[in-house]
């Protein structure tokens, strides 16, 4: 007599909840850059309101970078210890308050303090979203995800020139800082309600969890100490890549509005459309750069070849920025700067993804933080140089165009140096655990 066949369990429905997490990460970086870019967008008007020089504006902006460098040195390690959900939530709430704090300042020193507080608190953003990406996405999807959340920096920077002038002329500069800072707390509600580790999230089906966990398990357990991270060439490849290129993007966020005012005589009412185009294009570049390397991997390319090919394309695309000050039509400058920002973001998407290509998940936040500190040190150096050049030009009664020319030439060459350093340090991208023979038991 034949025994009845046991009923077969229906196949698990493949959910897509990890892309909701991607949306949260994108939104976090969008808010981050709205708060970060607001001062730079209002700087031409604040310069008139308070009688500042361009050098004083650069000095104020410098203190954000000093604090950001300090914060990033610790943010990644703190995130690795307290967890992604709590760490990013605390950082987010604190930087929204820091943005609102600007409204209470009326002196150069006061604005320096506000920028310092903003820099310290914003330091948790990129280590946090990079760590969340490593927790929620398999390696083959991470460059695309990095492209999406990195595009948030462009969307945030694109929102500011559209919203800031309206708020400024409708309510004044103090209420502009208060409204923008307070609006960010909406994100925090969704983050606290939705973010958990994949295995703990009931909206994730077993089939989706299998996709998320499809990479081979990390062979290094516990927390890698910073000394051990810094002993690897992989860490230094990321550090050098961030040092030479973050400074350019951050200079653009802070001082491009001033460039358009000084070089093309635009005012805050007319800056909106050019910056909307610049950052819209940059957002497309961020997603495109992440898509390119992911698509090459899907076609059978090695991770090493795919990432570095995408990065090389981006480096070549940045080079025309060296000629920006030689054009007289503002829309040609917008075209050059749009391409430069797009290719920077494509570069950045692949550079960030290289961390999770090389390091175990529990070390991703720390590596991102250390690299971010290096990027801030580069930004400090470039802003210090800019401030010094502005002051020298003012003392000599010279036109400031040569200041911008020097900066844009540095920008063009910096990506070449960054890629050369990256490839020299890591001729082949491979996980750091393949190079480490044993894991100290004390590394907890």
Image (spheres, rainbow, N blue to C red):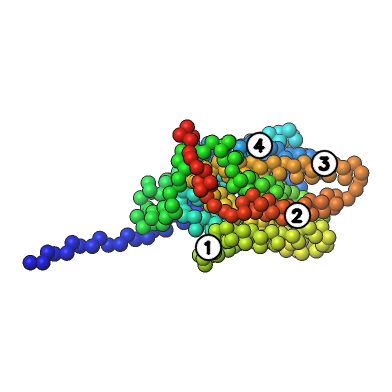
Cα distance between the residues tagged 2 and 4:
26 Å
Q: Looking at the rendered structure, which numbered label has been put on residue 413?
A: 2
- Residue at the spot x=71%, y=59% of the render? 318
Looking at the image, is mark 2 or mark 4 nearer the viewer?
Answer: 2
Pick the front one: 162 or 342: 342
**Relative side of 224 to 209, left or right:** right
Query: Are the residues flagged by discs 1 and 4 in contact, CB closer than 8 Å?
Result: no
Q: CA distance from mark 3 to mark 2?
A: 21 Å
Q: Is tag 1's residue or tag 4's residue first in the polypeptide sequence? A: 4
What distance separates the C-alpha of mark 1 from that of mark 4? Answer: 38 Å
Image quarter in which the N terminus is found: bottom left
- Point 53% across, 63% down: residue: 297
Task: Tell me the residue that label 1 is attached to.
Answer: 297
Residue 388 marker: 3
Between label 2 and label 1, give the one nearer the viewer: 1
Please determine whether, in this image, residue 232 is positioned above or below residue 442.
below
Helix, strand or loop under label 3: helix
Residue 356 position within the rendered picture, expressed as x and y whole percent measured from the top left: 53, 50
Frontmost residue, 304 versus 63:
304
Q: Earlier in the sequence, mark 3 or mark 1?
A: 1
Q: Residues within 10 Å of mark 2 (few under 14, many from 20)?
A: some
Element type at mark 1: helix
Helix, strand or loop at label 2? It is: helix
Whichever of callouts 2 and 1 sits on the residue coming sooner in the sequence is: 1
Question: Which of the two discs, 3 and 2, sits closer to the camera?
Answer: 2
Find residue 148 and report its horizontal and vertical position in percent: 55, 56
Tell me the number on the disc at residue 67.
Answer: 4
Q: Closer to the observer: label 3 or label 1?
A: 1
Counting residues from the start of the chain, the first of labels 3 and 2 encountered is 3
Quarter holding residue 208: bottom left
Q: Cβ–Cβ below 8 Å for labels 2 and 1?
A: no
């Amino acid at each position: 007599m034949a025994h009845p066949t046991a009923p077969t369990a229906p196949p698990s429905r493949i959910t897509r909840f990890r892309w909701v997490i991607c949306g949260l990460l994108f939104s976090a970086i969008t808010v981050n850059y709205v708060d970060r870019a607001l001062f730079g967008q209002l700087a031409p008007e604040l310069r008139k309101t308070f009688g500042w020089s361009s050098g004083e504006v650069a000095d104020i902006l410098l203190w954000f970078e000093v604090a950001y460098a300090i914060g990033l040195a610790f943010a990644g390690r703190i995130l690795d210890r307290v967890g992604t959900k709590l760490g990013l939530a605390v950082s987010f709430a604190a930087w929204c308050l820091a943005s609102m704090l600007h409204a209470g300042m009326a002196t150069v020193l006061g604005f320096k303090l506000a920028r310092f507080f903003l820099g310290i608190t914003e330091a948790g953003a990129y280590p946090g979203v990079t760590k969340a990406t490593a927790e929620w996405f398999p390696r083959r999807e991470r460059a695309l995800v990095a492209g999406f959340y990195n595009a948030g920096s462009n969307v945030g920077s694109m929102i500011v020139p559209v919203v800031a002038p309206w708020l400024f002329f409708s309510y004044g500069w103090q209420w502009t800082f208060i409204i923008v800072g307070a609006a960010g707390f909406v994100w925090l509600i969704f983050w606290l309600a939705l973010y958990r580790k994949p295995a703990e999230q009931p909206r994730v089906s077993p089939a989706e969890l299998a996709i998320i966990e499809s990479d081979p398990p990390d062979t290094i357990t516990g927390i890698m100490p910073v000394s051990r991270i810094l002993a690897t060439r992989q860490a230094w490849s990321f550090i050098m890549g961030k040092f030479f290129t973050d400074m350019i993007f951050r200079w653009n966020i802070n001082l491009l509005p001033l460039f358009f005012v000084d070089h093309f005589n635009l005012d805050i009412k007319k800056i909106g459309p050019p910056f909307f185009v610049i950052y819209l294009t940059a957002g497309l570049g961020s997603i495109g750069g992440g898509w390119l390397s992911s698509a090459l991997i899907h076609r059978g390319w090695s991770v090493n070849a795919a990432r570095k090919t995408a990065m090389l394309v981006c480096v070549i695309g940045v080079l025309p920025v060296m000629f920006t000050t030689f054009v007289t039509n503002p829309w040609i400058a917008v075209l050059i700067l749009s391409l430069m920002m797009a290719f920077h973001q494509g570069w950045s998407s692949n550079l960030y993804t290289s961390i999770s290509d090389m390091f175990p998940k529990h070390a991703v936040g720390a590596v991102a933080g250390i690299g971010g500190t290096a990027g801030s040190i580069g930004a400090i150096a470039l802003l210090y140089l800019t401030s010094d050049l502005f002051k020298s030009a003012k003392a000599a009664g010279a036109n400031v165009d040569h200041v911008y020319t020097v900066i844009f030439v540095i920008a063009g060459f910096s990506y070449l140096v960054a890629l050369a350093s990256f490839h020299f340090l890591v001729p082949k991208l491979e996980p750091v655990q393949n190079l480490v023979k044993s894991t100290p038991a004390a590394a907890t």
